[in-house]
Image (cartoon, rainbow, N blue to C red):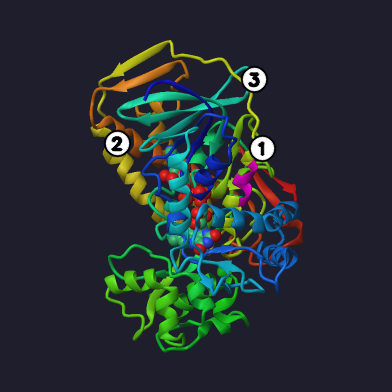
Amino acid sequence: MNYSKFDVVVVGSGAAGLYGALCIPKGLKVALITKDMLNTGASDWAQGGIAAAISTDDSPQLHLEDTLKAGAGLCDRQAVEFLVENAADSIQSLVEMGVAFDRHQSQLSMTLEAAHSRPRVLHAADTTGRAIVATLAQQVLQRENIEVISQAFALKLWINEETGKCQGISVLKDHAITWIQASATILATGGAGQVFAQTTNPAVSTGDGVAIAWRSGAIIRDAEFVQFHPTALTVPGAPRFLISEAVRGEGAHLIDQQGRRFAFDYHPDGELAPRDVVSRAIFTHLAKTGESQVYLDLRPIEPEKIRYRFPNIIRVCQHWNVDLFTKPIPVTPAAHYWMGGIAVDTKNKTSISGLYAVGETASTGVHGANRLASNSLLECVVYASQLAKLEVDEEEKITPSETLTVTDNWVEHLELVNSIKNQLPDLMWHSAGICRTQVVLDSAIATVIEWRSQLLSLPLNQYVLNLLPQQAIEFNSVEAESQLKLYAETLNLLDIAYLILKSAAFRTESRGGHYRTDYPNTLAAWSKHTIIQGNNLSCVDI
Ligand SMILES: Cc1cc2nc3c(=O)[nH]c(=O)nc-3n(C[C@H](O)[C@H](O)[C@H](O)COP(=O)(O)OP(=O)(O)OC[C@H]3O[C@@H](n4cnc5c(N)ncnc54)[C@H](O)[C@@H]3O)c2cc1C
């Protein structure tokens, strides 16, 4: 890849990046870079569906109320209004592009999910995300103004020191680091579930966009709010595969070893209570009983319905020797969705001029302290559609003054990097997981700061953090690219851990996806966003 100039660079090819790239005016030249393959990301794994109040007995107002209620007092009303009012148009656009949502006769069929007051979740069996991503990716590949650059890892923002404006990004690809110059840089790098030992997220969810933006001074908002999904498959050796909420929506029971529907001990809505409540109920119940998992019993659902609605869940469970028609699925909670992210307005603008964020990477204010199920795919599409109004300034092309050839190989440092990368998720699961306390958070912060300083002392650092936009690099060693990628991802995860821990230690109350055993109550005085910029923490009114 040559040193290049585009009008817009989009980083990430999930629902947000793909849909955003398609919405950008066709007259603009777009680079879509992605660190793995075009379809790799959480969007491709989304199962349950996408929420939209489009049936006759539903309304954007009801969707708004449900979203605000789930968000536990921290949603930005204006952002939610924007989401629910634009939902119908976004669904229409997806249908026109060719996304084949399930239908009942000619009508789009909709299911009920937890904390929704109406059945409003559109789906394509239990692989809704795959149906959306496949369609969007196909469209992207046909677009002449979009150049897809796969296996390209975004490292660092290019900030103009005089103006403070973002004018592109450095990228690691094909044994080289180059700079992509662009008038608008759009981060759509998804979530950060990999910072936790137990997660439903794919391997690419390492919070890169948030870490990159934070290091350049962008405002990060509400980082303490993490949604832990109550029901991830728990079988030795298996990844924490999500058993969708829709399964409970269709009538599955959450039971313990004795077959008791224990969730009703914790909330009158039982297994259909909000996700944080159900996750905490499982966490508490397991601590009380000393058992290691609970179970999802699908036997109350008609077998025909299970076959029609959940073919992928059947397939994955079968693969792990769980026949869900005859026995309950073992499950426990896992980190699932990060409500925190780069603070943006309804046009996806961050606090840095020229830098935009969309999708799970962004904090639009839509989810507040807790996301309503199936609102995130909707947020990706509704907010990305705003990129249709993107205006960019014509900028002069800057070419690098030097290309350095580097022969380094950092094999002797990999043990330290790998050891930090392996230990961090356990540290985070135990300190910033479902239940948090000050003393444990403070101790984890100290560990993360120490690990970070160890990483920063390694020579790899100069290529990730200290390279100047005038410098391009070519590596002679074939291992250098994978070593640098490992280093950069580990550093990003450490920065994400720092942001979550610091914000969680700061908020001395419990709300939504942030639960403090030492401050179990929700306090009116804390009806504020947490803001972190550099090392400065503060809170601002909603
Ligand atoms: C198992 C599972 C099931 C879910 N089910 C639902 C559901 O039913 N409904 C719903 O609304 N939500 C669901 N969610 C949440 C939803 O899928 C995500 O919030 C949403 O898809 C995020 O989309 P995104 O485009 O922001 O990120 P992703 O889809 O995660 O895409 C991020 C992209 O950025 C790329 N990237 C990351 N870092 C870099 C870098 N440094 N350089 C270059 N590229 C980079 C990745 O490779 C990827 O292409 C689910 C999530 C999971 C994990």
Name the spot of residue 438 as percent of width and height, x first. 57, 56
Q: Quadrant of residue 198?
A: bottom left
Q: Which residue is mark 2?
A: 482
Mark 2 touching mark 3, by CB under 8 A? Answer: no
- Mark 2 is surrounded, within 10 Å at the Cα level, by few (under 14), some (14 to 19) or many (20 or more) other residues, namely few
Q: Three-letter amino acid code at disc 3?
A: Thr
Query: Is 128 rendered above or below residue 173?
Result: below
Q: Residue at x 76, y 57 (%)?
A: 525
Mark 1 touching mark 3, by CB under 8 A? Answer: no
What is the spatial separation of the Cα atoms under label 1 and label 3, in whole angstroms?
23 Å
First-in-chain label (1 vs 2): 1
Q: Which residue is mark 3?
A: 163
Query: Would residue 499 be counted in the magenta stretch?
Result: no
Left or right: residue 103 versus residue 56 is: left
Specify the segment rendered in magenta.
382-386
Q: Which residue is mark 1?
A: 389
Q: Residue at x 62, y 69 (%)?
A: 120
Q: Three-letter amino acid code at disc 1?
A: Lys
Name the spot of residue 62 as percent of width and height, x first. 72, 68
Residue 492 visible somewhere in the drawing = no
**Secondary structure mainly formed by the magenta segment:** helix
Mark 1 touching mark 2, by CB under 8 A? Answer: no
First-in-chain label (1 vs 3): 3
Name the spot of residue 368 as percent of width and height, x first. 66, 57
Name the spot of residue 296 as percent of width and height, x first. 43, 79
